[in-house]
């Protein structure tokens, strides 16, 4: 099921964008995830929809040196993954933008295991994803195994942290509510329900299949609810293990934000686009500002204040 999902087609505009972005580099694969994947799965192919949003990719490399960037960025990505870059280009006259996170295969494997104390990667890849570029069949198999592991990890935590019995959708909602709470996120508490919208059958099948693979004594109730069969003692142990992850989640994300101030390639162009999109204020981007976005941030903030953005909305759009 996941192999079919990974290889499902995406609009040609996205494929061409990724091919040009990869260029002569040889990563293992490029994974496409996020809200636009769900829209495409539901039949949305309008180029204007793609142009309005930001494509979300994960670049999986074999070695940190396989993707061109500075030494500082490679070291930072090795110590606290992932690094994030911003790319934009016109494809067939359509302006497309993308955020690209970079992970090595070794990191991808580690961050999708149940023992991992960082919840961000396995939680994302339990959701629908597409493999939009791959180096070869061996790389595709390696990436697929990581995605399978991410889904299995998520399903196991859903069983251990969830209710005694519920619909499969109820287990997933409870899990994603936990993962969002463990991160420094701005989404509302209803976000966990939106992640399942239109994909309920997919999540239900993956939950039960993962439980069977994990050897859980799950039971299907006549009313359509399922019981994970996790003993109470194991659930209590899981709660203690999760408490550690919940405490670490926000400090990890804050550390990544601090790191991004120095390693986010293309950050200035991304910020300028977001400002113009949400406030209508044009912010000229000089070569110096593009190279030193942190240094120039106060000037940008002053320009927004003078333009009345804060008076109009109370807070700037993020």
Image (cartoon, rainbow, N blue to C red):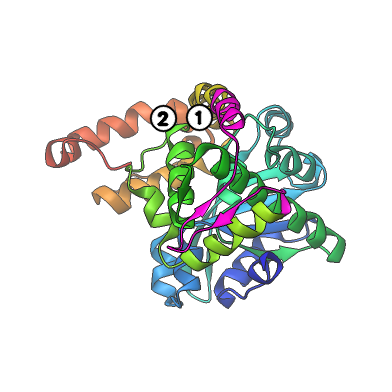
Quadrant of the image occupied by residue 53: bottom left
Q: Nearer the viewer, residue 23 or 4?
A: 4
Is residue 244 shown left or right of residue 93? Answer: right
Specify whether residue 287 is in view: no
Q: Please name the residue that numbered disc 2 is placed on.
A: 296
Which residue is at the far right?
138
Dots 1, 2 in contact, CB < 8 A: no
User: Callout 2 environment at 10 Å: few (<14), some (14 to 19), or many (20+)?
Assistant: some
User: What is the CA distance from the residue labelled 1 to the residue labelled 2?
Assistant: 17 Å
Magenta highlight range: 213-242
The numbered disc on residue 283 is: none
Image quarter in which the C terminus is found? top left
Q: Please name the residue that numbered disc 1 is placed on.
A: 257
**Percent position (x, y) of residue 58?**
63, 51
Specify whether residue 21 is in view: yes
**Percent position (x, y) of residue 120?**
56, 39
**Percent position (x, y) of residue 37?**
51, 64
């Amino acid at each position: 099921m996941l192999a079919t999902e990974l290889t499902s087609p995406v609009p040609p505009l996205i494929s061409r964008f990724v091919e040009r972005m990869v260029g002569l580099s040889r990563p293992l694969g490029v994974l496409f995830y996020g809200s636009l994947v769900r829209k495409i799965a539901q039949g949305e192919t309008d180029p204007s929809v793609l142009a309005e949003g930001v494509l979300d990719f994960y670049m999986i490399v074999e070695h940190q040196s396989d993707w061109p960037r500075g030494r500082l960025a490679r070291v930072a990505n090795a110590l606290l993954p992932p690094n994030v870059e911003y790319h934009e280009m016109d494809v067939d006259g359509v302006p497309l933008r993308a955020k690209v996170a970079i992970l090595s295969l070794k990191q991808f494997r580690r961050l999708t295991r149940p023992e991992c104390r960082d919840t961000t990667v396995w939680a994302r890849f339990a959701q629908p994803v597409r493999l939009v570029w791959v180096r070869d069949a061996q790389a595709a198999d390696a990436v697929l195994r990581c995605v399978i592991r991410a889904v299995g990890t998520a399903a196991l935590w859903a069983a251990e942290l969830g209710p005694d019995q519920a619909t499969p959708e109820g287990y997933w909602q409870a899990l994603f509510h936990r993962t969002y709470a463990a991160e420094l996120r701005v989404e509302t508490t209803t976000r966990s329900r939106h992640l399942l919208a239109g994909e309920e059958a997919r999540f239900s099948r993956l939950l039960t299949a993962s439980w069977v693979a994990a050897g859980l004594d799950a039971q299907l109730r006549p009313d359509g609810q399922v019981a994970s069969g996790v003993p109470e003692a194991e659930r209590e142990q899981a709660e203690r293990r999760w408490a550690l992850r919940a405490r670490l989640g926000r400090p990890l994300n804050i550390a990544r934000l601090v790191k991004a101030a120095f390693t986010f390639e293309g950050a200035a162009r991304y910020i300028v686009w977001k400002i113009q999109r949400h406030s209508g204020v044009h912010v000229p981007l000089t070569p110096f500002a593009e190279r030193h976005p942190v240094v120039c941030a106060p000037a940008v903030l002053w320009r927004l204040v003078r333009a009345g953005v804060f008076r109009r909305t109370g807070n700037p759009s993020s």
